[in-house]
Amino acid sequence: MSFDALFQPGRIGPVEFRNRVVKSPNSSATANMDGTISQRTVDHYRRLGEGGVGLIMTEYTYIDDDASKAIHNQPGMSRHEHIAGWGWLVDEVHATGAKIGLQLAHGGRQKFLGTAPIKSATDSSWDYVEAVAGVIPQPVTVAEIDDIVTAFAQAALRAWKARFDLVEVHAGHGYLITNFLSPHTNSRTDDYGGSFENRSRILIRIVDAIRATVPRDFPLSVRVSVTDYEPDGIPIEETVELCRMLEAHGVDVIHASGGHHATMEWEVSPWFNTRAPHRWGWEKFRPELSIPVIGSGSLVSPEVANDVIASGSADFVSLGRAMLADPDWARKAQAGRALEIVPCIRCNDGCLHRGVDKGRSVGCTVNPSVTEEGRFPITVAGTRKSVAVVGAGPAGLRSAAVLSDRGHEVRLFEPGELGGLLTHALGSTVKQDIAALVDHLVHEVRRRDIAVVPARATAAELVASGVDSVVLATGAPLREPDFPIAADVPMIPAAQVRADAPLHGRIVVIGGGMQGCETSLRIAEMGDAEVTVVEQQDSLLTGDEVVYDAMKLPQFMRQAGVRIRTGARVSEVTAEGVSLLTADGVEVLPADTVVPALGRTPASNELADELRSAGIDVHVVGSALRPGRVYDAIHTAFFAARII
């Protein structure tokens, strides 16, 4: 496949770039506590540069030592002492052939450290941050605004001294400048509140101050949210006018994204949201500008990204999580090796839920090495072994590929379809990211010409074959219903619902965990189905779910027409329908098809025990070890395969 539009040279101001692909800012949380750059930070960004990207935008960087630092281990540019570390990082990135820009930000009301002071346009608080320590924002005074404007300008000057190729002001995503721009968070009555002109005043002052401080040939970018997606928030008409003003005041490029942290389903759009969700917005103002526009937001595949450039929708594309998943995204896309790209599945699990949100550095579900670059190399094993991988779900497929790369003789046993339970995603629009992962994992096994045995492996056969090691990736069994189901009722387990065999009529999905919720969305997109999800708890997704799924997935289900019944326990399923025990008594839901989605139970250790008793080296991975998510499958498989 060809993605030629992505790999044409580009220009921002006087600076030329080798292609149109930008690494979007993602918090890595790898800096030292004082904001100085660590070896891990340098290794992370150098690895991104080696992947062939044209421009790397660093993670948001605080500009003063008062209230602008927003997160643990965030890098700073608030002091002269920060320049040296950044200069080191810049030189390392330049050595890869990539250009690099520094993004400057003030955290505003999104100070996730939770510590005082939190300063914003007003005292409008976000409950997620306030819950950390009970601190609410203080409205910044006019004198403090003057100091913030100066701090941005001086930080930009330090970026120039560190020899960055450009500097960017973060004016989106709910940080301080957005707190002023959005009527949702700005109720001031002075010169910085009320009218659009007043609400944009602080940003224009910052731009003017930077332009008066750094050389004119040092490009200046501003990142904006096309809207914050709040009903009383930033209208697109104001964003269009804002971008016109920014160009008039000397900004060289607009970096367009969307949302803020209280609308994370737009800022870091999850798997159930559309790809390229902000395209509609930047296409409103790009025709009004003579400076380039960088389009950003879930442009995870080269097909989507290439279309943005080829169609004239934007001048550059910015990818964040996609390059955490695979830092070689650009090189592989340029070579037409799209299936070799490890796809971002937009799960927000490794990067946010188990990563930055827990106070750790950023991680990735599908890339265990992110921010640990160089620590976990896949090297050729000292002794070549015969290894059997039993099960071809995500854990089995990933371990088989790594074992092959280590030089082992690998046989993969799978009596069914390669991909395991993830094959439910194939053909589904709402699960296109998981479907892309299945295609990738299967491709990687086939590309290595790994022997696939279409049979269920037994302990006796494995022992008789003389195998040295066995990786058990057999998954976990589906939980069986604990209520009677009449034999004549059409029933299909959630894991077997597929787009190529659409369901029709009244569909009752039993179970409101992740399996039930995602299955209901897949059925709803089939078009000729009326879907109801039944959950005995008082709300959906009450398990250990990714927080963004728990917060926003039910909203998307309702928008898709899915009916939700909570606080209702299924007592039986008969030809008349699904009998529910509710607070108001017994109710029967008519159903043309019943879809149990009850999750999984722990797997049996029987096969592992038999093999170990025969002296075989056994490694259990994925849900066979314990039921989990894709993160658990990929990580356990990767680390097990590295030590065999």
Image (cartoon, rainbow, N blue to C red):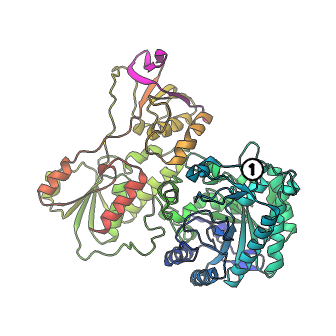
Residue shown at the point (47%, 64%) measured from the top left:
340
Q: Position of residue 531 (x, y in %)?
A: 53, 29
User: Split into 4 quadrants, where in the image is the C terminus?
Assistant: bottom left
Q: Nearer the viewer, residue 331 or 566?
A: 566
Is residue 579 shown in magenta?
Answer: yes
Magenta part of the chain: 560-588
Q: Nearer the viewer, residue 535 or 333?
A: 535
Q: Is residue 96 above or below residue 169?
A: below
**Residue 500 as seen in the image, left or right of residue 619:** right
Q: Count up the numbered dots.
A: 1
Residue shown at the point (53%, 78%) measured from the top left:
42
Residue 346 in view here: yes
Dot 1 crowding, Cα within 10 Å, few <14, some 14–19, many 20+: many
Is residue 372 shown in magenta?
Answer: no
Residue 601, picture quadrant: top left
Residue 290 in view here: no
Magenta stretch: helix, strand or loop mostly: strand
Q: Is residue 405 above or below residue 286?
A: below
User: Split into 4 quadrants, where in the image is the N terminus?
Assistant: bottom right
| Residue where numbered disc 1 is placed | 185
Q: Nearer the viewer, residue 14 or 1?
A: 14
The amino acid type, in three-letter code, at marker 1 is Thr
